[in-house]
Amino acid sequence: MHRTKVKKVVMENVLDANDTLAGANREKFDAAGTYVINMMSSPGAGKTALLERTLDLMRRNKLRLGILEGDVQTTLDADRLARFHVPIVQVNTDPGFGGECHLDANMVRSGLSELPLHDIDILVIENVGNLVCPAEFKVGEDTRVMVYAVTEGEEKPLKYPLMFRSADLVLVNKVDLLEHLDFDLEQFLGNLDAVNPGVQRILTSARTGQGVEEWCEWLEQRLPAHERV
Amino acid sequence: MHELSIAGSVVEIASRQANGRRVTKVRMKVGHLRQVVPSALAFSFELVTEGTPVEGAELEMEEIPATGRCRACAEESRFGGFPLQCGSCGGFDLEILSGEELLVESLELEEA
């Protein structure tokens, strides 16, 4: 049998479906008055350790934080943060397609029903540790914060520009190790500016607590003036 | 391997647009500024098309170069890599014109 081939012009953005869901998440956040941070980094850059410091410091003022943890497997990170008694929900990406390497808008949506958004001023979404994939998927966040450890080398902004370009703030973590490393901080910051000129950055150490105060102030500044403590 | 998710979305778009017909080719536009690895996307595409109307279809990817207009001198440049910098005045304040595409451009369908 003869079959005719026809061309159909589509012009459809591949990420449209995700972006639509991200928009719906965002409406939910806005309605609840929750400011949302999408926190991204490589595995082991210190996201969870920084969050421990953050939650510890934030206990002293009245800012109410919530955490949505994304991991391929385990609830280890959520367990670590449980002692701070803030709302935490763990989303495992494992039931997805063999364990997704990132959170997408739908996965975040699935975790939201377990979070009391109206009682959360700032929700931190701790994305799956991965320097590439999470940057492609909006989840409904207001802002993107990247954690970068000085042990990762100076050249990564040039090698993995997508995430560095999309970040609104970069927490340059593990700076307590600088004296033991050959890491050239100025060169790294130059590379960072090459892909994201002038992006805000704070030098932090989750181990010593350096910079955590400044990071918490940055967080407080995200809220509308009348809601600040 | 977010190419797997992207391939899944591509197949979903193609299947819906095909409306019951068999898809023999999918043409995509992939911007140079996206971190999509063509070989990884092609591999993922083959995996996720199995058992769908897109199974066996050829995936054609056109890479779109990164271009932008300088906000200082209004000149347009094409960028080979980072830093993205105006080719005329060296400025960094740029409006990206192309290179961020991730589109299903068109399909080739088999009419029964």
Image: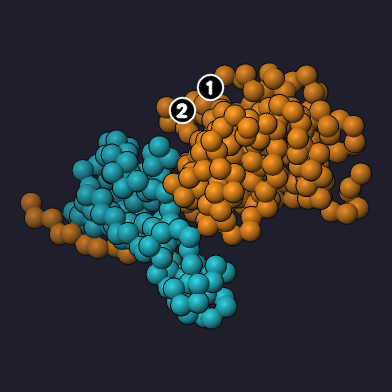
Chain colours: A orange, B cyan
Please state which amino acid type lies under the numbered disc 1: Gln
The quadrant in which the C terminus of chain B is found is bottom left
**Could you tell me how far apart the alpha carbons at marks 1 and 2 are, in whole angstroms?**
8 Å
Please state which amino acid type lies under the numbered disc 2: Gly
Left or right of B67? Residue B20 is left
Label 1 element class: loop
Q: Does the CB distance between marks 1 and 2 fall below 8 Å?
A: yes
Query: Residue B110 lies in what quarter of the image?
Result: bottom left
Instruction: Pick the residue in front: B92 or A82.
Output: B92
Which residue position holds label 1? A73
Which residue position holds label 2? A99
Residue plotted at (80% across, 23% down):
A85
Q: Which mark is residue A16?
A: none
On the image, the x and y values in percent for residue B55 come to: 24, 42
Residue plotted at (21% across, 43% down):
B56
Is residue A43 in sight in this rendering? yes
Can you say whether B80 is above or below A109 in the image?
below
Left or right of A196? Residue A200 is right
Is residue A120 in sight in this rendering? no
N-terminal-most mark, 1 or 2? 1
Residue plotted at (24% across, 57% down):
B108
Say if labels 1 and 2 share a chain.
yes
